[in-house]
Structures are given as structure tokens and as C-alpha cells.
């Protein structure tokens, strides 16, 4: 009796059983055992990573405030005001209060978490960052913030875990009980303003009382850094100081201004996790300390809820893989019925995808040997093309970056700034004031070169730099030339390539004014209209023929000299086609170089 061949329907049933039902039984058992062993460790690691990340966010906030205060310490604006504080009248205090209010607000404008910032000195408060917290001189004295700052000897001190109404002795706030700034984080710092000027270091004279900067951050701003970061139900997140006092909290178990148990506060200065029994319930405790500030962040996650969530995850994974296996079974059954046609359709589809610029190389490999070799070759071709495109892009990008860096390094040699300051002091001591002025100009040029490594700078800064440069060169070539600089006020904040004017001015001085029988005049103009920014460098020097100009540009490019060729290359790298560069020169009349930087080309 002949054996009938197995039909397609039977094959599909066998495939569904083999690829879905049987593996599902083994998978369910394996998944349950795997999650029971690893869910706790995974949760511990991820929760601790969250606590550490929250601490880093808080440290950025506090560090940002301290950085702003450090910038204030070295500001001549504050020094000039408070160095005259002994002679303040009431009218002076009111006038300076307005100035300081605006300046302090600007100083902390980037720190949105700062609710209040002001300076306290000689029974007067200067500046208000907001109108929400109304602090008086009596409030500062009652809270003794000025004494705390004085004891810290100029270092910033963070005061935390206190009730604002109680600290300031405000009966109104104590009776009110609930207000938005009841619990705040306060930084105080004694501000002995000081700064260097022309080689001399200035500090505040003996005044009635050194100003104290007070900065308030409300508790809800601190809470935003961690609130909702731990997703497990009934979890608790708290921030405490080194005394174990709660600074910020997202729960009622550890209210603000309360003390946490010793078995939790003892972890201050450490980082890690452990298991803890609290009020008859077992918790996972994840903790991390904020180095240098004495703060401890910790999260308590109930173990029963943790396991409940784990069971939910197991069910989700089981259902997901069950559905996936069923879908795979259907796909395999369909592939069996399309053994011959599917590979061809796949290659046609892949060809259209490649024609559209997609080289993902994901064409499936068929079972037939000939078509399999063809598909493998097609996928390898896609990978090679994709790799070639990526490598060419990387090479082009690196080449442009290297060119920019090399050109910038040609125009910005590294000098020893501190050595110049020493020479300046010696010049002043020897009453060689002309040399001192030259050194100061050079020092200011170096400061500008090093303070910002970006490719472009403000016109106002470039004006200061080229003015110093021309002052130095006029000292070197006395009586040879004079300079005229005309810059419109409305272009001072525009951005141009850094040091773009210097090589053009240097060419005019070294080459244009050589062997002339009249006073050289170097004129620099910067203007703008609605289409472009116009830069002009002109001289009345010897000038050149066009043949001489082309030879000079070729020699400069080959020998690595700075000058017109260098400027042209930098402009090309930065603006592409978005600029015009024109040189007009005549022997005996002079040379004029015009650069137009277009806004929308």
C-alpha cells in the first residue's frame, strides 16, 4: 500500500507545535527561575545608579551657584562699589542697591533654581533676585548667616535642614506655618572682592564689614532632581545632611526638618545598597553621598512590592515570547510555501532599497545554494558601499578640522603669559613705562587668544586685540606709520573669524610701508548693511603689481607664512561660498583688501 505524502496543512501543524507549544513550556519554567535569581540584583544596581545620577544633578546645581559666586569675587564691578563703602550715604546705598540688584540677577540668571540672592553689608541688604522671599537686615542677623560666613573665612557654606521662620525669628511666618520657602537650602559666603589690574592685585580696604553673599534655593527645586525617579510603588526618597536632618523628601515617613534613624544616617560618606528593616517592613536601601558637601541621598524600596513587580514582569515576558514564537511559526510556514519565489522577490525589493540610498544589508538568505551565494554577495556589496561612504565622510571631516586647527595655531603662537607679567613688574620698577605699556598690550592679546578656543570672536574683542597689536607695532616702527580704526557701534556684537585682521595689518606694516618716503597710514573699517558685514584694511604704502601679488600668494602658501593666502583659506573653510575677498593694489598708491561676509548666501 502506497504511503501518501504529508500535506502542507500537516506540515504547518507540526511546525506550530514544534516552534510554539513545546518550547513555550520549557521557556516559562526557565524564565521564572531566571527572574527570581536576578531581579533583586538588577533592581539594586539600577536603583543605585539612579540615586548616583540624582546626586550628580544636585551637585551640578550647587556647583553652578558656587562658580557664579567665584566669578563675582574677581569682578572689578563689585570691587569698585564696596571699596568705597565706608563713605556711603543713604542715597549712595539706595543708588548702588539698584545697580547691584540688576547685576546679581544677571549673575544667577542661568541658575533657575536660585530663589533669592543678595549681599549683606553694614546693616544693609543690596540686591533682590526675586520678590517672593522678603529678607530683612534683622532676619540675617537673627539667623547669624553673616557670622557663619565670617567663620568660614571666604569659603562657601551650605546651611540646610532648618525652618526659615524659626531661623530668622519671624513671628508672622511661625504663626503662618505653611509657606513656599519654609524649608530652603542656603549658601553664605564672605565676599572679599579682589582682582588683578596691570600687574597689581587689588583687595578690599579696611571697611566696616566685609559683604556676605546669601543665596537661597527652595526645597521644591531640590526635590525636582529626584522626584519620581524611583518607579517602584511605595518607594521613599530622601536627602539628609551630615547631622541626619532631612533636607528634602518626597514622602511623609521622613518629613523635612526631622531626623532619620541612626542606621540610615550612618551611611553618610558612603555609596552602595543593603537590606533594611524599618517599622516592621523589609526595604532595599540604596544610598549615595555627595562628596565634599556632607549630604546623603537614599531610596527605600519595599521588598514585597519589588517582588510583585517582578512577577508582573515575568508574565509580560512570557506573553511576549509566546506571541513571538507563534508569529515565527506562521512566518516559517509561509516561507515553506514560497520556497522558490520569496528569494527572488527579496532581491528585487533589496535592489529598490539600494537605489533609494539605503545600504542596511539586511536581505534574508535563502536556502537554495545558488541564490544564497548571490544574496550574500549582494549584502556584502551593501556593507562595503556603506563603509566606504562612512570612511570618506570621516576623512573629509577630520581633514577640515585639522586644517582649521593648523591655521589657528599658525596665527596663535603660545607665549608665556606669566613671564610677561614678571617682565612688566621689572619695567615698572625701573620706570620704563613705555616698555610696560607694550607688555600690557601683549598680555591682553594673549589673554584673548587663550580665553576662548572657538573659531569666531566678537568684533568688539577683535577691535581691542588689533588696537593692542597696532600699539606694539607703532612702538617698534616709530614714525613709520599711523593707524585709523573706524567701526560702527551696531557691529560690535557681530561675530567674525578670530585674528582675521592681524595678518592683513602685518602685511601692510612689513611690506607696504617698506622704503616709502612719506608717513604711512593704515586704515581699518568694519561696517554692515542688510546683506553683509564689510571689513576693509587699506594702506597708502608701496603697493604691488598683480604679478607681484600672485607670486607673493604662491610663496606664502608654499612656505607656510601667514598673510593673504592664510586668510583666504580660513574664510573658505569657515564660510564656503558665503564670502567675497577682493584685493586692489597699485604701485606707489597702496593696497586695499575688502572682505564681505554675507548673512544669507
Image: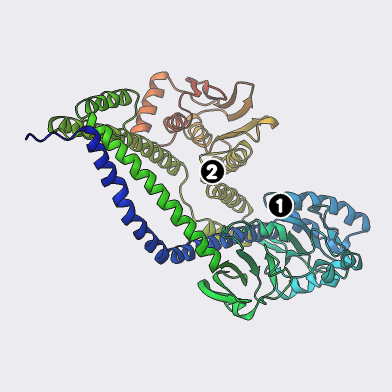
Most extreme residue toward the left is 1
Kindly identify which residue carries mark 2: 476
174 or 42: which is nearer to us?
Answer: 42
265 or 543: which is nearer to us?
Answer: 265
Decide if residue 375 is on the left or right side of residue 216: left
Kindly identify which residue carries mark 1: 107
372 or 29: which is nearer to us?
Answer: 29
Rendered residue at 42%/65% (across/down): 36
Q: Could you say which disc has been placed on residue 98 in the image?
A: none
Return the disc, 2 or 1, that comes first in the chain's sequence.
1
The x and y percentages for residue 571 are: 47, 30
The image's colour scheme reads rainbow
The x and y percentages for residue 61 are: 63, 58
Most extreme residue toward the right is 90
Q: Quadrant of the N terminus?
A: top left
Q: Is residue 23 above or below residue 165?
A: above
Decide if residue 388 is on the left or right side of residue 402: left
Decide if residue 242 is on the left or right side of residue 508: right
The x and y percentages for residue 92 are: 89, 55
Amino acid at each position: 500500500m502506497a504511503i501518501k505524502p504529508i500535506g502542507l496543512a500537516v506540515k504547518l501543524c507540526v511546525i506550530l507545535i514544534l516552534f510554539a507549544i513545546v518550547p513555550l513550556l520549557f521557556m516559562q519554567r526557565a524564565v521564572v527561575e531566571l527572574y527570581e535569581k536576578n531581579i533583586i540584583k538588577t533592581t539594586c544596581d539600577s536603583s543605585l545608579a539612579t540615586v548616583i545620577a540624582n546626586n550628580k544633578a544636585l551637585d551640578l546645581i550647587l556647583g553652578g551657584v558656587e562658580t557664579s559666586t567665584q566669578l563675582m569675587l574677581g569682578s572689578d564691578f563689585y570691587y569698585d562699589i564696596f571699596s568705597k563703602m565706608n563713605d556711603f550715604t543713604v542715597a549712595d546705598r539706595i543708588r548702588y542697591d539698584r545697580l547691584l540688584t540688576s547685576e546679581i540677577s544677571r549673575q544667577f540668571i542661568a541658575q533657575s533654581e536660585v530663589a533669592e540672592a543678595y549681599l549683606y553689608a553694614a546693616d544693609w541688604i543690596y540686591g533682590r533676585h526675586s520678590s517672593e522671599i522678603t529678607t530683612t537686615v534683622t532676619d540675617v542677623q537673627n539667623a547669624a548667616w553673616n557670622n557663619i560666613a565670617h567663620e568660614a573665612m571666604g569659603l562657601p557654606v551650605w546651611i540646610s535642614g532648618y525652618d526659615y521662620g524659626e531661623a530668622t525669628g519671624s513671628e508672622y511666618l511661625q504663626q503662618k506655618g505653611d509657606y513656599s520657602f519654609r524649608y530652603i537650602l542656603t549658601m553664605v559666603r564672605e565676599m572679599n572682592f579682589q582682582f588683578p589690574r596691570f600687574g597689581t592685585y587689588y583687595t578690599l580696604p579696611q571697611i566696616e564689614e566685609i559683604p556676605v553673599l546669601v543665596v537661597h534655593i527652595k526645597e521644591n527645586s531640590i526635590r525636582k532632581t529626584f522626584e519620581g525617579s524611583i518607579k517602584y510603588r511605595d518607594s521613599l526618597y530622601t536627602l539628609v545632611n551630615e547631622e541626619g536632618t532631612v533636607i528634602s523628601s518626597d514622602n511623609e515617613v521622613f518629613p523635612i526638618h526631622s531626623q532619620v534613624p541612626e542606621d540610615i544616617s550612618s551611611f553618610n560618606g558612603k555609596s552602595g545598597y543593603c537590606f533594611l528593616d524599618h517599622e516592621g517592613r523589609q526595604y532595599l536601601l540604596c544610598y549615595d553621598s555627595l562628596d565634599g558637601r556632607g549630604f546623603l541621598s537614599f531610596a527605600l524600596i519595599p521588598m514585597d512590592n519589588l517582588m510583585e513587580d517582578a512577577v508582573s514582569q515575568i508574565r509580560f515576558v512570557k506573553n511576549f515570547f509566546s506571541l513571538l514564537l507563534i508569529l515565527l511559526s506562521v512566518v516559517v510556514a509561509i516561507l515553506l510555501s514560497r520556497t522558490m519565489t520569496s528569494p527572488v522577490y527579496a532581491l528585487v525589493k533589496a535592489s529598490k532599497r539600494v537605489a533609494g540610498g539605503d545600504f542596511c544589508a539586511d536581505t534574508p538568505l535563502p536556502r537554495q545554494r545558488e541564490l544564497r551565494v548571490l544574496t550574500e554577495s549582494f549584502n556584502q556589496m551593501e556593507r562595503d558601499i556603506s563603509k566606504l561612504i562612512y570612511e570618506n565622510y570621516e576623512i573629509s571631516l577630520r581633514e577640515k578640522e585639522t586644517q582649521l586647527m593648523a591655521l589657528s595655531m599658525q596665527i596663535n603662537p603660545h607665549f608665556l603669559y606669566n613671564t610677561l607679567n614678571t617682565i612688566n613688574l621689572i619695567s615698572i620698577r625701573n620706570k620704563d613705562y613705555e616698555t610696560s605699556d607694550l607688555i600690557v598690550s601683549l598680555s591682553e592679546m594673549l589673554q584673548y587668544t587663550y580665553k576662548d578656543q572657538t573659531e569666531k570672536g566678537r568684533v568688539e574683542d577683535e577691535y581691542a586685540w588689533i588696537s593692542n597689536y597696532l600699539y606694539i607695532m607703532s612702538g617698534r616702527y616709530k614714525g613709520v606709520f599711523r593707524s585709523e580704526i573706524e567701526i560702527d557701534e551696531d557691529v560690535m556684537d557681530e561675530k567674525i573669524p578670530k585674528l582675521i585682521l592681524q595678518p592683513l595689518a602685518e602685511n601692510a606694516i612689513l611690506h607696504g610701508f617698506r622704503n616709502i618716503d612719506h608717513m604711512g597710514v593704515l586704515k581699518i573699517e568694519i561696517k554692515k548693511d542688510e546683506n553683509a558685514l564689510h571689513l576693509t584694511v587699506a594702506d597708502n604704502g608701496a603697493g604691488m603689481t598683480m604679478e607681484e601679488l600672485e607670486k607673493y600668494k604662491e610663496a606664502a602658501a608654499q612656505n607656510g607664512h601667514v598673510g593673504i593666502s592664510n586668510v583666504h583659506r580660513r574664510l573658505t573653510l569657515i564660510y564656503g561660498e558665503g564670502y567675497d575677498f577682493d584685493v586692489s593694489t597699485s604701485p606707489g598708491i597702496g593696497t586695499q583688501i575688502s572682505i564681505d561676509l554675507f548673512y544669507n548666501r
